[in-house]
Image: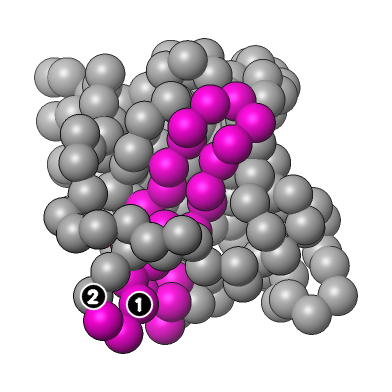
Amino acid sequence: MTKTQEFTELLSQDHSRNDEQLFNFFDSLLPLTIDDMISKWKGEDINTGHWVSKELVNMNWYGKWYKNQLEAIPLVCFNQQGKLFSEQKFKGEASLWMVEYRGVTTATMVYDGVPIFDHFKKISDNHVLGVMNGKNTSGLPEIIQNGRYYFFHMKRVSNYPTDFIS
């Protein structure tokens, strides 16, 4: 069974009670480099009941855009006119770094304005699994909510479905 097939099966399961299955799968994946991440990505939530899920729905989150290591747009969202833009909810943009997480060094997005990290592992060449980690900060609920992490996945896209406005 490929990692893509395993992931499809994993998505069909209930993850509202704990993160163990998601972390077991995350730990089984290969790490990524910064170069692997340079692209436009369409993101999708994995429903674990984490507060970030609702927040991203409210923001009309589409995905992320990694132009290069130091130019990352973490919250590419739809505006009311249906165009994509950079939502500044988490106080700015981001950058990519190689960071050790759960014993493995992998590509990680670091937000510029808040102490939040998105760690990535490879499902396939064009599909990645992300887990959000970080420390609590004023103005936001707990990043690790009652011991639970926020998980999401992204697929590489060559073009956005509409214009991106600055």
- Residue 64 in percent (x, y) is at 42, 47
Do callouts 1 and 2 mark residues in contact (Cβ within 8 Å)? yes
- Whether 72 is among the magenta residues is yes
Q: Secondary structure at mark 2?
A: loop
Residue 3 on image: x %, y %: 24, 24
Task: Provide the major secondary structure of the magenta segment.
Answer: strand
Between the C-alphas of marks 1 and 2, the distance is 5 Å
Camera-side residue of 77 and 22: 77
Say above or below: 83 vs 74: below
Queried whether the magenta region covers residue 126, the answer comes back as: no
Q: Give the vertical position of 10 relative to 123 (above or below).
A: below
**Residue 65: x percent and y percent?**
43, 42
Which quarter of the rendering shows the N terminus?
top left
Q: Residue at x 14, y 30 (%)?
A: 5
Q: Find residue 69 and report its image quarter.
A: top right
Name the residue type under label 1: Asn
Residue visible at 34% across and 38% down in the picture = 40
Residue placed under numbered mark 2 in the picture: 82
Q: Residue at the spot x=47%, y=35% of the render?
A: 66
Q: Which residues, given as a range, are shown in magenta?
A: 56-81
Name the one closer to the observer, 94 or 100.
94
- For residue 45, say whether it is visible: no
* Crowdedness near tag 1: few (<14), some (14–19) or many (≥20) residues, C-alpha within 10 Å: some
Q: Is residue 37 above or below residue 149?
A: above
Q: Residue at x 28, y 69 (%)?
A: 83
Dot label at residue 79: 1
For residue 99, what is the image quadrant?
Answer: top right
Residue 160 visible here: yes
